[in-house]
Image: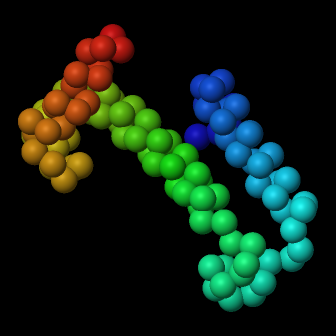
Amino acid sequence: MRFEDLPKAEQEALAAYGYEIAAEMETKDAPSPGDPTLDPRYDPSRELRRLNYQRHALEREIERTVDASREHGQSWNTIGRALGVTAEAARRRYGVRRLQHA
């Protein structure tokens, strides 16, 4: 997915994250080679923010794919198996969301 295809709020969040990382990089010396956790400048919260963004992006992609699967006539059983959950768990998680946004 291209940056331009993301919703405006996601574009703004991703741009803000990029500016934050750029500002951090400009104020610091070159990173130390080896294990980054041994560097006194290491900030694990930055990694958490990156992972959190990725988690939300993946969830949106899964939601779109579940919607496409349903539109193509796939059963909740098939979708649940693909996600590693029961049909009921898939329907509860993604079926209700779809009805709310319809």
| Image coords of residue 59 (percent x, y) | 40, 41
Residue 27 position (above or below residue 36): above
Residue 75 position (above or below residue 28): above
What is the tally of numbered marks visible in this picture?
A: 0
Residue 23 placement, left or right of 62: right
Residue 86 placement, left or right of 30: left
Let me know if residue 66 appears in the view: yes
Residue 26 position (above or below residue 56): below
Residue 39 position (above or below residue 64): below
Q: What residue lies at 60% left-to-right and 59% top-to-bottom?
A: 45
| Image coords of residue 53 (percent x, y) | 55, 46
Q: What residue lies at 73% left-to-right and 78% top-to-bottom?
A: 40
Q: Answer with the quarter of the image where residue 38 lies.
A: bottom right
Q: Answer with the quarter of the image where residue 7 lies.
A: top right
Q: Which residue, as the protein is rendered here, is positioned at the far bottom?
A: 34
Q: Nearer the viewer, residue 14 or 2?
A: 14
Residue 62 placement, left or right of 71: right
Q: What residue lies at 10% left-to-right and 45% top-to-bottom?
A: 86
| Image coords of residue 41 (percent x, y) | 75, 73
Question: Which quarter of the figure is the N terminus placed in?
Answer: top right
Q: Nearer the viewer, residue 78 or 101?
A: 101
The colour scheme applied to this rendered structure is rainbow
Let me know if residue 54 appears in the view: no
Residue 38 placement, left or right of 80: right
| Image coords of residue 52 (percent x, y) | 51, 49
Q: Which residue, as the protein is rendered here, is positioned at the far top?
A: 102
